[in-house]
Image (cartoon, grey):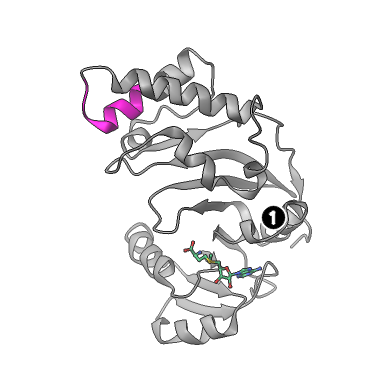
């Protein structure tokens, strides 16, 4: 796994190691940063299976290495939208077969997240969904998530656009849910998601484990379909 652009301190990298090692004790994780000072400051945290390296979208992997998972949180949003597809295509070229790229954005404390899921399929990177993630321990309303959409969506929210209509429909379902006698926000979230699917036709995951955690996984995102991206550098 690669954690690209881990930031001023490698907290997310260390947390990922802790969580994912439970699933895969032999996980190898590489934190990659473009800022040399941030690499230097992270080095004391290196340990068996955890490295920190200087690099950018051109990942510092060996010629025979590939990543099963690449996470790039709050990185691509710093770049112009025109560079988005090119950067993804380059990152995707480092994925192994069926590898996953998680690219997204959060609010500064990490309470809300919006995450693009991309899968490698042959020589292409395929958009597999957008996860909109709420913290249900805090007051929630769907439109809060608009402010943290990833780069490929944030500039496409003009009133009347398909994305704006989606958030309008989700807000209406949420308002209806909170007027019921149910008070558990996890049940409200699941109920609003069910209406969003059944009454508005949005294609989303009904997995109870996702909905309970405040994760709305949209399989097809309103607006223009994202075409498969040809990987920039075949490995
Ligand atoms: C806003 S911080 C995000 C930190 C962390 N991922 C998080 O979500 O809290 C963005 C980081 O990405 C790094 N960065 C920007 N462009 C990069 C690139 N092309 N490759 C690697 N790191 C990059 C910056 O140096 C910065 O540390």
Residue 170 picture location, percent across and down: 47, 25
In this rendering, would 6 be left or right of 164?
Answer: left
| Coordinates of residue 204 in the picture (x, y in percent) | 49, 27
* Residue 235 vertical position relative to residue 196 in the rendered view, above or below: below
- The image shows residue 16 at horizontal and vertical percentages of 40, 63
- Decide whether the magenta segment is chiefly helix, strand or loop: helix
Q: Nearer the viewer, residue 73 or 208?
A: 73
Which residue is denoted by mark 1 in the rendering? 88
Q: Dividing the picture into quarters, in which one does residue 213 lie?
A: top left
Answer with left or right where residue 194 lies relative to residue 223.
left
Q: In the rendered picture of this protein, how many numbered marks are placed on residues? A: 1
| Ligand 1 shown in quarter | bottom right
Dot 1 surroundings within 10 Å: few (below 14), some, or many (20 or more)? many
**Left or right of 132: which side holds 15?**
left
- Based on the picture, tell me whether residue 51 belongs to the magenta stretch: no
| Quadrant into which the C terminus falls | bottom right
Q: Is residue 8 above or below residue 189?
A: below
183 in magenta? yes
Residue plotted at (51% across, 72% down): 30
Q: Can you name the residue that lies furthest to the front here?
A: 159
Task: Kindly identify the residue that appears in the image at 48 percent across and 19 percent down.
Answer: 197
Residue 223 on image: x %, y %: 67, 29
For the record, the magenta segment spans 182-192
């Amino acid at each position: 796994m690669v954690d690209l652009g881990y930031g001023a301190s490698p907290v997310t990298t260390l947390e990922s190691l802790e969580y994912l090692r439970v699933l895969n004790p032999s996980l190898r994780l590489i934190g990659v940063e473009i800022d040399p000072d941030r690499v230097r400051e992270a080095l004391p945290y290196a340990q068996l299976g955890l490295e920190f390296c200087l690099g950018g979208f051109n990942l510092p992997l060996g010629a025979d290495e590939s990543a099963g998972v690449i996470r790039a949180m709050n990185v691509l949003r710093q770049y112009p939208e025109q560079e988005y597809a090119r950067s993804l295509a380059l990152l995707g070229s480092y994925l192994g077969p069926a590898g996953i790229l998680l690219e997204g954005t959060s609010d500064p404390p990490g309470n809300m997240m919006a995450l693009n899921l991309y899968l490698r399929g042959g020589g292409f990177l395929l958009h597999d969904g957008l996860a909109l993630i709420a913290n249900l321990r805090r007051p929630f309303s769907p439109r809060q998530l608009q402010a943290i959409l990833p780069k490929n969506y944030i500039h496409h929210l003009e009133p009347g656009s398909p994305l704006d209509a989606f958030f309008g429909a989700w807000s209406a379902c949420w308002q209806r849910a909170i007027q019921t006698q149910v008070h558990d926000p996890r049940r409200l979230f699941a109920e609003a998601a069910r209406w969003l699917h059944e009454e508005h036709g949005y294609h989303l995951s009904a997995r109870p484990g996702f909905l309970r955690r405040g994760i709305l996984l949209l399989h097809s995102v309103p607006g223009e379909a994202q075409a498969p991206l040809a990987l920039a550098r075949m490995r």
